[in-house]
Amino acid sequence: MIGARNISLLCLFSIFLLSCGNSKNINPDNYVLFDDNGGLRNCPVPDPIYKTGKIKCFIESSGSMAGFFQANKITGFKSDVWSVLNEFYGKIDSVRLFRDASEPVEKMALADFRRDMNTGNFRFAGSTQIPQMLKDVVLSLGKNDVGMFISDMKYSPMGSQADVLLTQYGTDVKNVIKNTPYAFSIIGLTSSYITGRGKTVENSPYYIILIGNDLPVNKMKQRIMQSIRKENLLGEISFYRTEFPTPMYTLLANKGIVNGITYESNNKLYYTIGDINKESDVTFYLAADLTKLPYYLFSDNKLLMQQLEVKADGARATIEELTDSASFDFGNGSREAANKVHATHFIKIKVSDILDGSTQVSVSVKRKEAGWVSAVCGAKYEAEYDKTISFEQLISGLKGAYSADKQSKYYYNSPFIVLITEGKR
């Protein structure tokens, strides 16, 4: 990993075409984000080293969950849940079972949980009291811990106040979460579900909830989504306390680029293209680490391409192509630079009509709602096994807790910035 001191030194370097002649100010239009030498003033830095504490694992075993645990029956739930627990085996000390608000949480070893899950040897009881369960997860967390809660999230209060409590569900969730420092991530999955009458229902949704500090929740979410079978994955939706900073990025030389970008020594990171001919188009690749994007964007280049926005001051810019690390055609020096920024994606950008001889190009990623959420909403009854009753109220409460209506329209707190100029050293 590159240290902060080295990062500051790397920022002083730029990409240039091979050229001769006297040096001059290569930022003549005084773009304030760059210095006179074309160096980016505030370079992105690596993520801080974050020591993750324990993973506090909670699993709901109220009545509506029984169909996922049927004795000695194969379900996607059993397979994927054990895959996730095994992924974090060294961090999970035990599994805590939620049954009913009137009963204490039962704590059991992972091996015992696996045995009882496979044999269906649980006592299922009571209704799902989601707000209280979320509160118990939050209260269990110590410094740097992450809470993991596995549930069908079917809030089903009982008794004479049930209807009123349902209308208050979103507010109750908001009140549990809003004053915490934590992120909240929901991973949606599906599994076969066996009803009380023995009927098998395919693709019944359930969820893995992660609660904790922003960075460890994001990293844990990525690991979980890579450890489960993709055919059982609905998607994810996450809420964070702060906007993520712009990830590390660099410009790359690539075979076939018309400008023939040439590196200086030592494979530095680059943010500026100099000594251009303003009569010609400028084409380049921007390599970036996009792992903090929602998985439905990160894993779908076609969808991600639609969310990319590029602007150029006094010029015309277009995004020509988006590729990932598996398909990128590396040119001289590119692989080393891409590795330094842990690049996952490569954005090909074309800039034309640079009228004043220099331009600042910015690339942003626009937010997009997770499409899968609406598909599981709208249930009127708990027995609608392909949906989740009250899920819309849960999402509404979370949006209120995180003031989602005030969020930027973009995912990062600032765009990727590139300087293109006639100037040369």
Image (cartoon, helix red, strand yellow):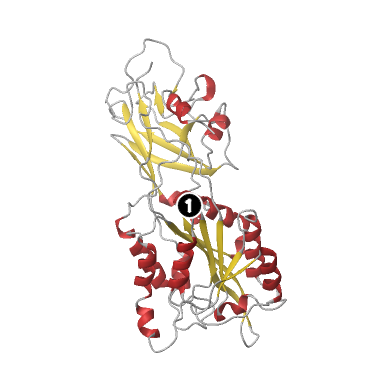
Residues 192 and 214: in front is 214
- Element on which disc 1 rests: loop
The residue at 39%/63% (across/down) is 177
- Say if residue 71 shows up in the picture: yes
The residue at 38%/64% (across/down) is 398
Question: For residue 10, which quarter of the picture?
Answer: top left
Residues 59 and 280: in front is 59
* Residue 124 image position (x, y, % from top left): 59, 80
| 8 left or right of 81 in image | left
* Label 1 Cα crowd, 10 Å radius (few <14 / some 14-19 / many 20+): few
* Residue 45 image position (x, y, % from top left): 44, 35
Q: Amino acid at mark 1?
A: Lys
* Residue 54 image position (x, y, % from top left): 56, 54
The residue at 39%/89% (across/down) is 160
Question: For residue 320, which quarter of the picture?
Answer: top left
Screen quadrant of the N terminus: top right
In the displayed orientation, state which residue is furthest to the top: 22
Screen quadrant of the C terminus: top left
Instruction: Count how many numbered circles sit on residues in the image.
Output: 1
| 164 left or right of 73 in image | left
Q: Vertically, is 288 above or below 91?
A: above
Q: Vertically, is 379 above or below 338?
A: below
Residues 359 and 109: in front is 109
Kindly identify which residue carries mark 1. Answer: 143
* Residue 340 image position (x, y, % from top left): 53, 33
- Say if residue 193 shows up in the picture: no
